[in-house]
Image: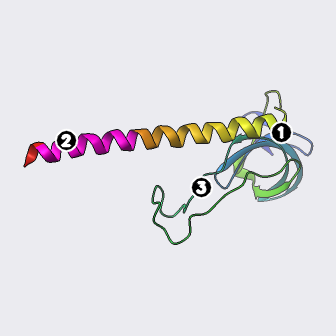
Amino acid sequence: MKETGQQLEIGSTVKMDYKTGVYVGELIEVNAPRGVVKVLAVLKHPDQGDLHNPYDPDVPMFHERRALSYTEKALTLLRDIKPYAGKVPEYKASLAQALQAEIDMLDKLKRWAERGLEQLEGLGREYK
């Protein structure tokens, strides 16, 4: 199986999109159209909440999604597996970095929403 000019084969280091997270791992099995990846690092922490109602905090079940564990095996579609050429980060450090990046992104979104609300409230007073 070829992907972007590089060979994906058993034992290859790969980048895998899995649900809403992104991981680095080792391809350990291929059963087209799926592959099994052993997780070695976390590049993006999974999103929280209801994926069918993004940015809605008032859903009946606000899902908590944990990152896949170190050496956990994940079955995913081959289209979601790409070659990875970089240095594989240490799992715990990569998990901490991915978690902090997700926290920072949500904090920035929260601050954006707060500023937007301030602007709209100001406009509301002006419109009266």
The vertical placement of 17 against 49, above or below, is above
- Tell whether 103 sits left or right of 82: left
Q: Earlier in the sequence, mark 2 or mark 1?
A: 1
Residue at label 2? 122
**Which residue occupies the extreme bottom position in the image?**
60
Amino acid type, label 1: Tyr
Proximity of marks 3 and 2: CB atoms separated by less than 8 Å? no
Residue at label 3? 48
Q: Considering the numbered disc 2 on the image, is that residue within a helix, a strand or a loop?
A: helix
The vertical placement of 9 against 54, above or below, is above
**CA–CA distance between discs 2 and 1?**
46 Å
Answer few, some or many: residues within 10 Å of disc 3's Cα (few below 14, many 20 plus, some between 14 and 19). some
The region drawn magenta spans 112-125
Q: Residue at x 79, y 34 (%)?
A: 93
Amino acid type, label 2: Gly
Q: Residue at x 75, y 52 (%)?
A: 78
Proximity of marks 1 and 3: CB atoms separated by less than 8 Å? no
Count of labels in the image: 3
- Tell whether 121 sits left or right of 58: left
Answer few, some or many: residues within 10 Å of disc 1's Cα (few below 14, many 20 plus, some between 14 and 19). some
Residue at label 1? 91
Q: Residue at x 31, y 42 (%)?
A: 116
Q: Residue at x 68, y 39 (%)?
A: 98
- Tell whether 18 sits left or right of 28: left
**CA–CA distance between discs 3 and 2?**
31 Å
**CA–CA distance between discs 1 and 3?**
20 Å
Q: Earlier in the sequence, mark 1 or mark 3?
A: 3
